[in-house]
Amino acid sequence: MSLAALATDLSLSARAHRVAAVAAEFAETVDRDARFPEEAVNAMKAERLLGIQIPARLGGEDATTLELAEVCAILGQSCAAAAMVFAMHQIKVSSLVEHGEESAWHIDFMRELAARQLLVASATTEGGIGGNLRNSICAIEIDGDTCRLSKDATVISYGTHADAIMITSRAHDKAAPGDQVMTVFRRGQYSLEKTVTWDTLGMRGTCSDGFLFKGEAPAVQIFPKPFAEIAAQSMLANSHLLWSGVWFGIAADAVSRAQAFVRAAARKTPGAQPPGTLRLAEASSLLQMLKSNILCGLKTYQQAKADPDHLSSMAFSIAMNNIKLASSETILTIINQAMIVCGIMGYKNGTPYSLGRHLRDAHSAQLMISNDRILGNTSTMLLIQKPDTSLLG
Ligand SMILES: Cc1cc2nc3c(=O)[nH]c(=O)nc-3n(C[C@H](O)[C@H](O)[C@H](O)COP(=O)(O)OP(=O)(O)OC[C@H]3O[C@@H](n4cnc5c(N)ncnc54)[C@H](O)[C@@H]3O)c2cc1C
């Protein structure tokens, strides 16, 4: 396709590639300065990517989880931080789409999000609870038509850049830690007092600082469904699948760089197979396995969406947990293989084969909900649940 044709192509893939080109241009500075990928997010808005998942009748495009994961993968090949911002936003939107239709306020918010390309952040992590998102210490206070919340939110990605934050808490001050709700607070309805600075190994551009969150809003902004159902039926699958899409993108770009290195070496010594070729083949095989893992998860989620009981089942949770565990571990092996192929040119910054940023960004995958925590949950379920032993369904 010619450049002119590509510039006017309105397919989702072409729009995502145009955003990816912008993201790639600024990826190094975003990483070096640990700054928000503003140019890439502005490009997402210009290409109207932030509302694609919202139903068409509310101004969106009815994008499927597969389409969202593909956009994550395209962006992940350019700038993992920008891709992760897109993924985290879409995970929040998925909860609106799946659980917001029972509430007039949430329907209106979806309409506005699609029209104005609003960016939504997430605050589940809490001081004293860590990554155990199914527990909260803070509790929402409901006073007539108004709700108030104060939360020690130790990680909120792009918190100061978001137009709204979806935040978890206990349902009331006497509720048990697991009796939670999720509330949408719009910018202007909350204050953020910075408590922790995000100066990390990788994913630096997600700007995931910690804040003391204080909000007050109309109580209708609390999701009518308990957070337990939201977590099981939309957040679990969307988080693991869209994160995996981003991670696939990082690994795919590492393999592309390794291939470019091997091809350049082959051109220098015609007739001789460059060292590293076998490792490239190995990395390509692992990348395909990673792709199969994600596609299998997407298919499982698509099938489960038709059956709410299955969506809340242990079998489904185990399947989604396993996608996350496999994706987050495999990418490190793939990028490491690519690094060995490229040698010092991969290890150095500023070469066409540099892989330091890929490797650093990829290390966050095991920690984004700790793999040990996920393994702990899965192992408890496996005391009861039969392992999946079929290739069908
Ligand atoms: C790039 C990035 C962006 C993020 N963005 C956000 C965001 O926008 N909003 C948000 O709310 N959060 C966000 N997080 C937080 C994240 O998803 C995790 O919840 C958080 O990082 C977990 O913190 P922790 O490492 O202290 O883990 P914890 O889960 O508190 O665990 C601490 C340690 O204990 C171990 N551990 C814990 N539980 C178990 C167990 N059951 N069995 C064995 N070992 C266990 C872990 O291995 C770990 O070493 C983000 C994280 C990253 C990396």
Image (spheres, helix red, strand yellow):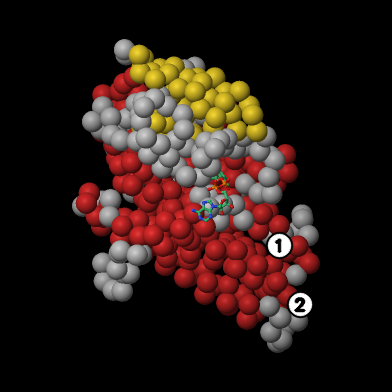
- The kind of residue tagged 1 is Tyr
Query: Is 237 or 49 nearer to us in this picture?
Result: 237
Let me know if residue 156 appears in the view: no
**Neighbourhood count class around disc 1 (C-alpha, 10 Å): few under 14, some 14–19, many 20 upward:** many
Ligand 1 within 8 Å, label 1 CB: no
Element class at badge 1: loop
- The kind of residue tagged 2 is Lys
Element class at badge 2: helix
**Residue 347, above or below 274:** above
The residue identified by callout 2 is 268
Whichever of callouts 2 and 1 sits on the residue coming sooner in the sequence is 2
Question: What residue is at 47 percent from the left and 20 percent from the top?
Answer: 215
Residues marked 2 and 1 touching at CB (< 8 Å): no
Q: Quadrant of residue 134?
A: top left
- 252 with respect to 13 (left or right): right
Tell me how far mark 2 sits from mark 1, CA to CA. 16 Å
